[in-house]
Image: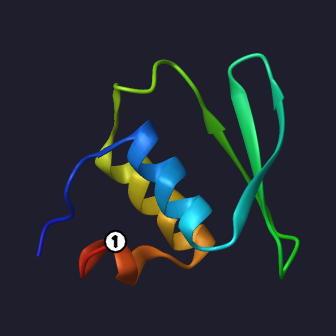
Amino acid sequence: MRMKCFSLNDLVQLLRKHNWIKARQTGSHMTFQNTYTKQSITLTNHGKSKEVCRPLAKRILKETGLLEIAYFGM
């Protein structure tokens, strides 16, 4: 099964829904942190409506543990 494309806004909504908060922002880089595990991930903000390429979206979702959720529905 092929993963759908994500916009930055979709990724941010998915992260926030699953206990990730925006910890800080420096320029166009937003850092999110998981409230339970204290793991952090950085996303680049080059326009909220722009799509994040599939390999990058897959890597982000895999690192955050949300890959299966993204495949089987939000």
**Rendered view: 45 above or below 16:** above
Q: Is residue 71 left or right of residue 15?
A: left
**Residue at image point 56% right, 79% down:** 65
| Residue at the spot 82% in from the left edge and 69% down from the top edge | 39
Task: Work out whether 13 lies above or below 64.
Answer: above
Q: Quadrant of the N terminus?
A: bottom left
Looking at the rendered image, the quarter that the C terminus falls into is bottom left
Q: Residues within 10 Å of mark 1 (few under 14, many from 20)?
A: some
Q: Determine the image quadrant of residue 21.
A: bottom right
Q: Which residue is mark 1?
A: 70
Residue 17 locus on image (x, y percent): 55, 68
Q: Nearer the viewer, residue 71 or 48?
A: 48
What residue is rendered at 48% in x and 61% in y?
14
Q: Residue at x 60, y 69 (%)?
A: 63
Extreme-left residue of the structure: 1
Going by the numbered disc 1, the residue's amino acid type is: Ala
Q: Give the image location of residue 41, x and y in percent.
A: 72, 54
Rendered position, 59 above or below 28? below
The count of marks equals: 1
At mark 1, the secondary structure is: helix
Which colour assignment does the render follow? rainbow
- Residue 38 occupies which quadrant of the picture? bottom right
The reply, left or right, for residue 67 in relation to residue 16 is left
The spot of residue 22 in percent (x, y) is 76, 47
- Where residue 40 sits in the image (x, y, percent)? 79, 59
Q: In screen coordinates, is 21 left or right of 48?
A: right
